[in-house]
Image (tube, grey):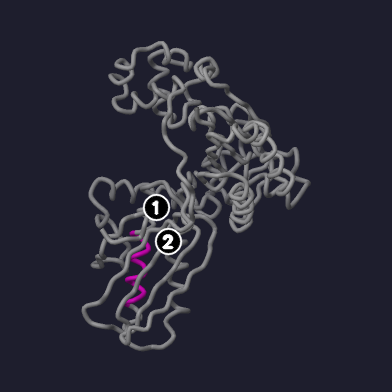
């Protein structure tokens, strides 16, 4: 029997801000762009009581709760605390998966032979709270789906254990929206058919769900019945995506080199968003005509936004290219990857920027990666790399 722990830092951005300023405790807090065109990156439970949620336009949120305190936010602080929690977990468990900046799965299967898994998990949660000052909720069951739902039910700042054999009764009374991967549109489709609670799906034949939602219906039916065999994928920051180009003729054209940096980074950023990932390290590689090779890298707050990554890559190139001699090869790598829902920088980007990225990605999904590009990137194509091991394919 498996033992899978799910941990999720409660209202992570808000909690970090409250560590910096205790006056925010107990107050309705909005983290995000302060202007009317900004969006809400995160909000406290006190703000949620007014109907506010993440990705909501800031002007709408402020109308719903005029007394809310708006905090600009600081991704560097959020990344710092995320790494702090990661380090604590890494030292304590045999295998873990960092599924986003504030969410973790831990595989403790077989560890009951040595000590009580539930007691150990509770002690680990208490250690995280004690050493970071951050609230964190936790669920334990035999699979990832049930543990994640348990964590959601445990919030705020609590823990729930779902014993083997009790998965279906635990899930049954909950709303179908609580099932991971059931979004608003799917939930609305199910509501129109009178399917409100998970219990209804449990009572339905699998074939009926497949007829309603296709392959997605199969997955939802299994999750509703507490069935999930997906493994905890061991986390490593060495995973990366990269691309590089060796020029037919060595070049000293700085403008051209900058344009290539833009094209490479834009392509990689789209790949991140397509796969639902965020990067925290940018590396630029340069090889001169005499084969002398140099690289520079920098850790940044988790992001998948083109303009943030392009700006960073161009800055690294400017610092790297200091010999003013012919260049033979240029490359960009994004690493320190995690899965994450923060597809863009909600702290900096306006509604118009968000809509622009969504529209651009939709065009790329339909018509290919090269269907829309920045002007600087036009005409540049590169050798494809396997997205998450950096090797050529």
**Cβ–Cβ below 8 Å for labels 1 and 2?**
yes
Instruction: Tell me if residue 49 can be seen.
Output: no
Number of the label disc, if any, that sits on residue 272? 1
Q: Nearer the viewer, residue 261 or 298?
A: 298
Q: Nearer the viewer, residue 272 or 355?
A: 272
- First in sequence, mark 1 or 2: give its number: 1
* Count of marks overlaid on the render: 2
Instruction: Tell me if residue 211 can be seen.
Output: yes
Question: Bounds of the magenta span?
Answer: 256-267
Image vertical order of residue 109 relative to residue 170, above or below: below
The residue drawn where x is 37% and y is 77% is 286
State left or right for residue 388 relative to residue 163.
left
Q: Residue 371, image x and y in percent?
A: 24, 55
Number of the label disc, if any, that sits on residue 334? 2
State left or right for residue 24 relative to residue 210.
right
Q: Nearer the viewer, residue 96 or 1?
A: 1
The residue drawn where x is 44% and y is 37% is 231
**Residue 200 lies in the magenta stretch:** no
Report, in whole angstroms, how far the alpha carbon at label 1 lies from the one at label 2. Answer: 9 Å
In which quarter of the view is residue 261 placed?
A: bottom left
The residue drawn where x is 49% and y is 44% is 99
Q: Residue 298, image x and y in percent?
A: 51, 68
């Amino acid at each position: 029997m498996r033992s899978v722990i799910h941990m999720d830092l409660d209202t992570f951005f808000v909690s970090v801000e409250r560590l910096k300023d205790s006056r925010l405790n107990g107050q309705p807090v909005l983290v995000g762009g302060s202007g009317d065109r900004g969006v809400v990156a995160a909000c406290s439970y006190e703000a949620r009581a007014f109907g506010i949620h993440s990705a909501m336009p800031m002007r709408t949120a402020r109308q719903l709760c005029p007394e809310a305190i708006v905090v600009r936010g600081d991704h560097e602080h959020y990344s710092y605390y995320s790494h702090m929690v990661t380090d604590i977990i890494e030292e304590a468990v045999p295998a873990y998966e960092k599924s986003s900046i504030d969410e973790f799965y831990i595989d403790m299967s077989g560890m009951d032979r040595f000590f009580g898994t539930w007691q150990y998990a509770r002690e680990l949660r208490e250690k995280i709270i004690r050493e970071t000052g951050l609230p964190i909720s936790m669920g334990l069951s035999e699979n990832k789906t049930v543990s994640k739902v348990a964590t959601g039910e445990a919030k705020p700042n609590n823990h729930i254990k779902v014993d083997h054999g009790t998965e279906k009764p635990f899930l049954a009374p909950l709303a179908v929206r609580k099932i991971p991967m059931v979004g608003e549109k799917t939930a609305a489709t199910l509501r129109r058919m009178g399917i409100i609670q998970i219990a209804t799906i449990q009572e339905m034949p699998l074939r009926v769900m497949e007829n309603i939602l296709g392959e997605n219906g199969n997955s939802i039916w299994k999750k509703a019945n507490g069935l999930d065999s997906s493994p905890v994928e061991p986390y490593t920051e060495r995973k990366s995506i990269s691309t590089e180009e060796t020029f037919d003729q060595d070049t000293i054209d700085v403008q051209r080199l900058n344009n290539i940096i833009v094209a490479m980074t834009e392509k990689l950023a789209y790949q991140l968003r397509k796969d639902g990932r965020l990067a925290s390290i940018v590396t630029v590689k340069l090889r001169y005509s005499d084969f002398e090779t140099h690289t520079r890298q920098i850790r940044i707050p988790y992001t998948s936004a083109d303009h943030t990554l392009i700006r960073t890559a161009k800055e690294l190139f400017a610092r790297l290219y200091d010999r003013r001699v012919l260049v033979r090869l240029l490359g960009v790598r994004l690493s320190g990857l995690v899965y994450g829902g923060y597809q863009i920088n909600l702290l900096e980007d306006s509604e118009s920027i968000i809509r622009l990225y969504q529209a651009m990605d939709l065009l790329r999904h339909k018509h290919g990666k090269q269907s829309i590009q920045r002007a600087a990137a036009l005409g540049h194509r590169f050798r494809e790399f396997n997205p998450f091991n950096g090797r050529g394919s």
